[in-house]
Amino acid sequence: MIDIALFGAGRIGKIHAENLVRQAGVRLKYVVDMHVPSAQALAQIYGAKVTDVEGALGDPSVGAVVIASSTNTHADLIISAANAGKAVFCEKPVDLTVERSRESAAAVARNGVTCMIGFQRRFDPTFAALKARIERGEIGDPEMLIITSRDPGAPPVDYIKSSGGIFKDMLIHDLDVFRWILGDEAQTLHATGSCLTDPAVQDAGDIDSTAVTIRTERGLLCQINTSRRAAYGYDQRFEVLGSKGMLQAGNVRPTEVTGWSANAVSVDVPEPFFLERYRQAYAAEMAHFVEALTTGTPVRTTIDDGVKALELAQLATLSWQRKGETLQVMSEGGA
Amino acid sequence: MIDIALFGAGRIGKIHAENLVRQAGVRLKYVVDMHVPSAQALAQIYGAKVTDVEGALGDPSVGAVVIASSTNTHADLIISAANAGKAVFCEKPVDLTVERSRESAAAVARNGVTCMIGFQRRFDPTFAALKARIERGEIGDPEMLIITSRDPGAPPVDYIKSSGGIFKDMLIHDLDVFRWILGDEAQTLHATGSCLTDPAVQDAGDIDSTAVTIRTERGLLCQINTSRRAAYGYDQRFEVLGSKGMLQAGNVRPTEVTGWSANAVSVDVPEPFFLERYRQAYAAEMAHFVEALTTGTPVRTTIDDGVKALELAQLATLSWQRKGETLQVMSEGGA
Amino acid sequence: MIDIALFGAGRIGKIHAENLVRQAGVRLKYVVDMHVPSAQALAQIYGAKVTDVEGALGDPSVGAVVIASSTNTHADLIISAANAGKAVFCEKPVDLTVERSRESAAAVARNGVTCMIGFQRRFDPTFAALKARIERGEIGDPEMLIITSRDPGAPPVDYIKSSGGIFKDMLIHDLDVFRWILGDEAQTLHATGSCLTDPAVQDAGDIDSTAVTIRTERGLLCQINTSRRAAYGYDQRFEVLGSKGMLQAGNVRPTEVTGWSANAVSVDVPEPFFLERYRQAYAAEMAHFVEALTTGTPVRTTIDDGVKALELAQLATLSWQRKGETLQVMSEGGA
Amino acid sequence: MIDIALFGAGRIGKIHAENLVRQAGVRLKYVVDMHVPSAQALAQIYGAKVTDVEGALGDPSVGAVVIASSTNTHADLIISAANAGKAVFCEKPVDLTVERSRESAAAVARNGVTCMIGFQRRFDPTFAALKARIERGEIGDPEMLIITSRDPGAPPVDYIKSSGGIFKDMLIHDLDVFRWILGDEAQTLHATGSCLTDPAVQDAGDIDSTAVTIRTERGLLCQINTSRRAAYGYDQRFEVLGSKGMLQAGNVRPTEVTGWSANAVSVDVPEPFFLERYRQAYAAEMAHFVEALTTGTPVRTTIDDGVKALELAQLATLSWQRKGETLQVMSEGGA
């Protein structure tokens, strides 16, 4: 039985707790949150204890930590946990800076601990099935990847101000999907964008609509289009053109009802947002983490994946800031 | 060059004229209609002459007639044309009575002329492709056929009064599709129905909603559901379950636009009614008729098909009148 | 905290146990199964005890029982549990005979206990959403219901021999859906069928393919087509035509991947069978049962629903045996 | 009655001839083709005469010309016809050079003649319906346009060598669709691409896979992905995200058959190539041209549209050649 400490008792922390306790071989021992009442409430549901970071990392029975606290705490917690010899599951992003992300990765490497980054999309049944079909050769050699990634609406401007910008906050997932699906690394990257939904976003120094193009080392092409606002819900699709065909990953609908009226034949809009859309993915990624812990097998989304996605997000930010300058990805992955 | 006389210059007559003149090897020589101005207007477009029945059938240069006049004239015209040695294309139904239909078929047989009945659905690209795929063995042995056939709205009650009832007027097409798709003959038939859309239909002695079940000689099952009113347009679908799979024929949409709004993801409603839905089918059936004329090959929808569909429609009417009594199809096909 | 005893530790018993223990306010206290090792295995997972029927019903702390044992034990257990004052959840069917079902219902009524029958389809998100949309008036007055219900393959003939026949075993769900969706009672019923998939089914005195037509007291029409074998998986669809439109409930697919090859554009086949297709429904029905227990609200699928569905299944069996005789539904619901 | 001369009796010339002769108010008087037997064969079908350019342009009865000859003849013929006072319909592109295109446009302007460029996609029922729905405000303000445009397979390398490159040959249509759908002009353009299907394309100095990003004057974003090869057929889709929703234009299928097998639920692949896909569009554009001629109304796709699309194609070529340099669109539209 592996004891686990959970950092962060907010929305995503609750989801991880719920999925953790379903797994055989692990026990949620501690909940840590700066806001103690939140920690207490969550701990009580699952019979866990409330403690602080030192208490959790100092307990030798704790074999792993799950980091679901705010982004600015991720790197410190990864490094501390790694130094304490704990296995780590950490929500994306590793950090908002490439430098600090690399330091975190170095700490993980130095201590030889397992560290999984929460790129849950790789565990979505639809996305994972598509990837498996590519690997079985169904579409031959992948050539182009088109990713559509749109949120149902912009978050509060205060959130945007501390988000690191749309590329690090929102596209980091898409940039990881790009690397995973094409199985290749970016060679050049071009990004542009606009503020189209709300001038307040622009005032905060950010944009809400982006168009990114990546050309990989093997010459494959990837286009990513994103928006903070899709009036019809959370839009998460991609398609891969290969030499022998194409595979598309579509949205998930709450029900399979089709309505026929005088005006239209219609089906449900997609699931409203990521908590609903990726519910199965969150469960599957935690099962994967626990399985890695209990069997000693490697995790599929490593801290290096987290660093690489951040490097690309950083590069995209720079390309946009330089008015669409096409940037080379450095051999070490930075701009 | 085969000269052709067209009887009937109404809505369906115009469509047949337009499709006829596109075919190589034939010429529209005469248009005949009790309402002479209609005949004149249509004749003028295509450089044809206006005449009467005797004029058309008495002209030895006329090799074929196309009968698109009112239903009560069909049998007389078929018999007269057959006796005059002309090939015949006649709109469904052959007649509203089984007896008169059989007399027409006898006249055709006696004179050895070609006679094609306008079951245009067999020439629809979707329906024809489905049939071809059954014949290629794609779904193994057909077992069940489910036909959905709904009009966009009831016709005027005056039309209904002289229509022969819903089974002869509307289901005759579906009963032909049943024979064609399953390639088997009915052994027992059960029909029920209701008047649900407009009490005036009931006052006219008819119903507007029916449910028919047929069991064939080989034990295959067919269910047909029909309504005079589908608020969303003309609904023409069927599906065939076979031992190895299923094939469905779906509706045809005017465009391939999909709209995503806050409430729904929607596509176009089906084509509004039969003239739009079966536009390609009307063209293809006339091309088939002319090809049969010019090459001497047999037609695919014979007057015997017309008689058999009418026999089933007559049987369905009787089953409904007898409150759902299951009726045996006689060896000669009658009730 | 309400203690619950579960009868039956087989496939469906395990599902109910898993869903039960997730609910607040209840505890799985006992597992009962003639095959004691099965009971022990299941009890161990959830910290429950193994006992026998008398032990479970004799424990005053037990407030409710969940009956998931073989069909021939249902009526006895319902009656015993009701007489012991326990609330009851029982898998369909109540019994294979109408008489015994009515006795069970009488015992429930006499003791004033809650009794829910496991018509889980009413709790499926797609089916429930469709029903709610009818009730909101989206399609006006319902007129016709077309149910397609096909299993992926016939069960072993030994199962069929003791199943009560296809109408009681398979269509009982569809007959409940019919009553629920149209909100009306059958007035006449017609059934026919064939043995098309395996002669062994016929040798066992049963059929594998059926076509049922029901006309309700208000004149609404319902057609049900079923087969024991759909090569493409478990096919569970229905559609309701109303005066203002139509609603369709479609199949559920494992993923939303679309593949485009040289030959076809294709999506996943439906979920393979009922355990996968109705996974959410099984969870929701158990949550509903527990909510009824803990709040004292009535259950939505009563034992009377169970009796009525069985009466219709019995009537369908009779209609088929009488070669498609259309039968009247008696005022008390029997044939 | 307006007499028309057709230049070019090849594949596309035949389509224009067939559509022309269906229109009221015009007559196909001349067919001109360097390959005289082709001209004769086509002329004979429609009762036209064979002549040469001088003969056609020198006949005062000729009111309009349709240019469907090879690309390198377009500019000369437009200028000559304009100078002769004839109305002009010309296939895209106007020319392979921006300079010569502008000279052609100048000749048209100087002579005040009507000149329509064959951007047939604007006349496709699906694309036109989508545009109309944008204009009705259904999705609010357009923000992003994603165009997918893939040919079923690369043409012979000899064709590619004289095609002007993929941007002028293939994307010119997409660049026109971009301007038409968003109703805005490009401000910056970025293009990249690869040769992924056949090294011979690279040897010819071209690429077969491209990714173009345009940012408009109002800040709207457009991404275009193209490939010379889609194994599943001719793939022509686009989608427009707006402030209130999204509209997608999908592919057109030959039939509406859905097949359900043990492995997949599948529909037809798209129409194989442009002649089938845009059949209705070719007919509609010619009807539009003739209507403009006979009523004096302006044409919807002018030679200026032709010049602007070519300027963008030229810019895209340059951006690609400069390894993805983001280029500004000059005020006069050039690079």
Image (cartoon, coloured by chain):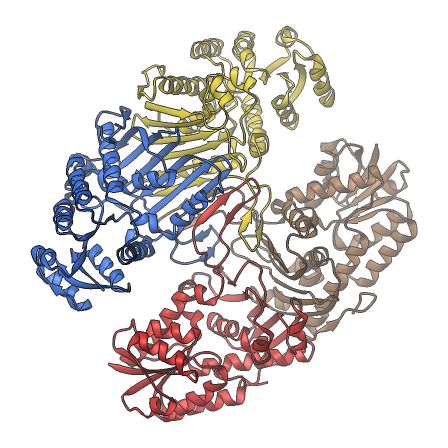
Chain colours: A yellow, B red, C brown, D blue
Determine whether, in the image, residue A145 is placed left or right of residue D195: right
> Can you see residue D298?
yes
Residue B216 location, quadrant: bottom right
**Side of C75 where A264 appears, left or right:** left
Q: Between residues B182 and B252, which one lies in front from this camera angle?
A: B252
Side of C108 where B289 appears, left or right: left
- Residue D163 higher or lower than B317, as above or below: above
Q: Quadrant of residue A69?
A: top right
- In the rendered image, the quadrant that contains the C terminus of chain C is bottom right
Q: How many marks?
A: 0
**Foreground of the two, B94 or D204:** B94
Q: Which residue lies at the image location 66% right of the left edge and 19% below the top edge?
A: A28
Instruction: Identify whether A282 is placed above or below C219.
Output: above
Residue D253 vertical position relative to residue B221 in the rendered view, above or below: above
**Residue D195 visible somewhere in the drawing:** no
Give the x, y percent position of residue B132: 40, 65
Q: Position of residue C210 (x, y in %)?
A: 62, 66
User: Percent from the top left, x then y, of residue B82?
Assistant: 38, 90
Residue ID at (36%, 39%): D147
Q: Position of residue B124 (x, y in %)?
A: 41, 66
D323 relative to B210 in the view: left or right: left
Check the picture and name the quadrant holding the N terminus of chain C: top right
